[in-house]
Every structure is written in C-alpha cells, then in structure tokens.
Image (cartoon, helix red, strand yellow):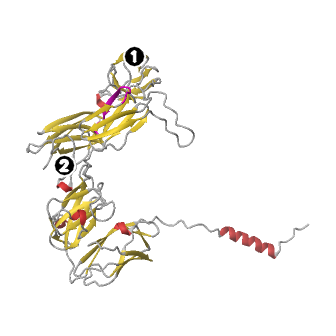
Amino acid sequence: MKPKSPTIAAICLIALLLLAGCAKISAPTGGPKDTTPPKVAKMEPADGTVRFDGKQIRIHFDEFVTLNNPSENVLISPPMAEKPEYSTKGKSVVIKFKDTLRANTTYNMVFSNAIKDYHEGNSLGYLHYSFTTGDSLDDYMIRGNLLDAKTLAPAKDFYVLLYKGDDDSLPLTTLPDYVSKSLDDGSFSLKNIAAGDYKLFAIKDINGNFRYDLPNEEIAFAEEPVTAFRALPDSAADSLKATLPLVTLLAFNTPDTVQRLAHFENPAAGLYLFPYQTRIGQFSATALSKCPDHFEHINATRDTVIWYFKAPLTDTAIFILTADNQTDTVKLTPYKEKASSGRGRTPAVKTLSTKFLNSGEFHRPLTLQFSYPIRPADSFNVWVHSQQQSHKDTAVYHYAVPDTFLTEIPLPMTVTERKNYAVMIPDSVFFGYNGLTNDTLRVQFTTKSEKDYGTLTMNYVLPKNGKQYVATLWLKDNILQEDVLTTSKTISYKFLNPDTYRVSVFCDENRNGRWDAGDYRTHRQPEKMYAFPHSISIRAYWESEETFQVGE
C-alpha cells in the first residue's frame, strides 16, 4: 500500500516550525563596559563669561547625566546665602540662581564628583566653571596640598577657605570669600580670585556651614597670610607651572583637654574599665564601702584605668575616683550576664581564657597570656615534645607563678633552630582571681632561625637646634618601637620579620614623649611630623641601611 502524500497544510506547518527554530532570538551580548565619564559638549553661557546678568547656567554633555548630591559636591564662591537649584534635563545640567549676584564679582563653581553618566554611573571627577558680573575675570589663584598632620597622608574632601580680612575669628563666624575642596591626592586650588593677601584655612565641615564651629571638626591653617599669584594659561609648560607657589597645610583635630569620666564598663565578672576623655596624669581611688581587693592597671595610652578584683563583687561598692583634677563617685554593681539577641541568656564563660604568644620566634620566649590575673603557684609543669629526624624527644620544664600582678608568663626553654615542637600544659593549672581555671593548653610550631629575620640600620641626622625628637618604626598601623632622640643617632632594628616597614620622626616640642595636635584658638600648629620618603622592604637574612635627614 502506497503511503499518503502530505497535504499542502502539513507542509506549510512544518516549514513554519523550521523557520521558528532558525529565527530564535537571543539577547545582544553588547560591547565592553562603558568606563568613560561624561564630557562637556557646551556651556551656556561660556566659561569665563563677563558682564553676566542671567539667572541660570546650562552645561551640556555628550550623554545623559544625573546629579550626585549637588548641595555637598558643588561649591560656589563667593558662597551664596541661598543655595541655587540644581536639575537635569536630558543631557544637560541646569543651575538656577535664587540669590542676587554681587556687582563686579567673579564667581567660581567647582563640581567635585557631582555629575555622573546616567547608565553606568561614571563620575566626572572635577569641573571648574567661572563667570563675572564685571568687565574682566579675576585671574589670580592659590594652590597647595593638604596633609594629615600625624600620618602625612593626603587629606581629601576638606573645604578650603579664603578670607580677605585679618580677623582671627573669621573661620568661626564668617562665610569665606572663596571656597574649594581638596581632591583625593590632597591637592587643592582656588582659581579666578582677586589679587591680594588672604587668610587660608581648610576644615572638615561636618555640618556644611563653611565655619569651624564643632569640637570634632578638623582644621588646618596657614600661619601667615598667603599671597595670590597670577595664573598661567593652560598652554604654559608644565615645567614652568611647577615653579609656582605651593602651600602645604596640615590638618588636625584639637583634642578635648577637659578631663572627664563619661561611664564605666563591666565586660566580665570582676573586671571594670574606666575610660577617660584625655590622657591620665595622676589617678587615685578611695573606697567608701567594703569590697574585695583589686589590681589596678592603666593602659598603654594612659586613657583607661582597668581594675581586676581578687573576688567577684557580691554587693554594690562605692568609690571616689580622682583623675588629675576630675573627681567622680561611681557605684560598682555585681556582674550580670547580658541577654543574647535571641534565645535566653549568653552562656557564662567557664574557663580562663589563655593564649600563646611568640610561638616559633627564636629571639623571644614562648609566652602565656591570660584574660584575668592568675593566683600564685609554687610549681607547674610544661611538656615540650621536639620532633627529630627519626624520633621524638620529650622534656618537662618546671615553672612557678610569683605572688605578683600577672597576666602574662614567659616560658623560657631551650629550642633549636628550625625544629618542630609541640607544647602541652594540663588543665586546672592556672586559677584566675575571677574563679576560673584553664582547659588543657596545646600549641605546635616550627622555630625560626636567625636567617629568617632581617635588620634595619637607620642613621637619624637631626638639626642642631637642641630640640627633642621621637623616632618611630611602624609595621602597617602598629608601632613596633619608639626612641627619644636629642642628637643624631644610629639605631639598629634587629629580628624584623620580612615585610614592609615605615619610619617617622616628630619634633617633641614640649618633651612629653608623644605627638600633640595643634589648636587654632591659641594659634598652635601640631607638632611637626617627618616621614621617611619611602617604605622599607625587609628581606630575610639581609641588613638594610638608610639615612634619615630630619629637616626643619
């Protein structure tokens, strides 16, 4: 029997299905991601316009744009009493003035990360626009760098303020004549300003009112009036521009010198912390009620008093605390466990927290650190297993805990370079005054050798001015060593782990051994900090030598 021929309708249906399969639509893959910020296509009126008498400015871009917090990121100088209105229209930014413009005045607008492209959010980092209501544009400028006074790192996003007057209260009470902002690298410029001498300031303006009026606002100030210089055209050679005056400002936050105890903390049973506002000179305490004896410790920065009671408090204890000239009465209550965020209470700590320090270090002894002072012990044993090539050796060391305030115990033991060790201390050997004891303690490590360390020899060359200096060796943000210097000196920093270090020196004007910030109200600049010009890479089994010429 012959098969039936397909009908015309069936043939058409098959053809349509095949076409549908071939014409499957896929999402376009697109090209590389756009990372280019918007570009200015046109300004209305043009940058540098004279005899301006309009009410608005329109800046056209090559793509659709959006505004990023213009009230913070657009600066106008001289500042206006009433801020303009900012809006976008397609590929344009429109600025409408609400304030009456001054006669014969040059205005400058600085856009700092205020404009982004609409789709990818690429920011136009910096844009400067100027116009004048007079017959000619002011063409003087002041430029400089702003640094953190203590770290010498660039200080960005500070308002830079210029005043024509000479009154010391200007930054506290008066709007500036000109304003700009420091960039990410700390640089700043105030362009198109009038010729003359100015008082120059930079502030971290927390409340955005262009005034230095909050205690936690940072400030930098030039000691003498700064003279504006005539700006060079953009076509001038870079080498010529590099010779133009450059002002360096150092930003700092004046510390609160009023001593006060705001509160006390009770983080664990028997442990009480008393943090003070400023560094503690003299401290004393008088008990007004009976309570257990306690150990007293002041932290390294001398701004917190720490008490460890020899027995947990069972009743309220009253003390009068005197730090320098500040006297407070405190009521210490027995420790209460803090409730957890979810189920019931936080479980009480049942063991004495203990950890090992310096494991594997060849030049420093293995050390036990306790979370609470421990009671005296005539003797305790430490088992040390050393892994040799073919067997294990075990040694037992005997130590004692003296009857003194102790939160750390060194465990000096004989070790060999580059050998594997396992150290074990049994449980219930140490008893804290808080009633807790230790679990079994174990640590494994491989000892280093002298070849694993490097040495830095630094030749400090000081000015012959009779002043005192403090040299500091840093590893990241940690101080490894500080040395007081009164004359040029060579210091050898030994047993440094391979890493990148930095060195700084400050002039200790008041000879108190610590860096002190400035105070604008008394016209005192921060103590001068000097940073070694580059970081120092230390390699194992290598000695580096550098010379630090400390300038004045």
Give 100 or 9, whichever is nearer the viewer: 100
Disc 2 marks which amino acid? Glu
Judged from the image, the secondary structure of the residue bearing numbered disc 2 is loop
Circle 2 residue: 527
For mark 2, does the 10 Å Cα neighbourhood hold few (<14), some (14 to 19), or many (20 or more) residues? some
Percent coordinates x, y for residue 95 in the rendering: 36, 77
Does residue 447 appear in this view? Answer: no
Percent coordinates x, y for residue 314 in the rendering: 44, 29
For mark 1, does the 10 Å Cα neighbourhood hold few (<14), some (14 to 19), or many (20 or more) residues? some
Percent coordinates x, y for residue 399 in the rendering: 36, 17
Disc marking residue 121: none
Give 269 or 453, whichever is nearer the viewer: 269
Q: Is residue 306 shown left or right of residue 152? A: right
Q: How many labels does the image show?
A: 2
Seen at 21% across and 84% down, the residue is 135
Seen at 43% across and 18% down, the residue is 390
Q: Is residue 487 shown left or right of residue 138? A: left
Give 10 or 521, whichever is nearer the viewer: 521
Queried whether the magenta region covers residue 242, the answer comes back as no
Percent coordinates x, y for residue 389 in the rendering: 41, 20
Circle 1 residue: 380
Relative to 398, say whether 40 is above or below: below
Quarter of the rendering containing residue 243: bottom left
Mark toward the start of the polypeptide (2 vs 1)? 1
Does residue 484 appear in this view? Answer: yes
The quarter in which the N terminus is drawn is bottom right
Query: Start and end of the magenta stretch?
Result: 289-302
Give 96 or 12, whichever is nearer the viewer: 96
Quarter of the rendering containing residue 214: bottom left
Relative to 481, say whether 241 is above or below: below
Q: Residue furthest right?
A: 1
Disc 1 marks which amino acid? Phe
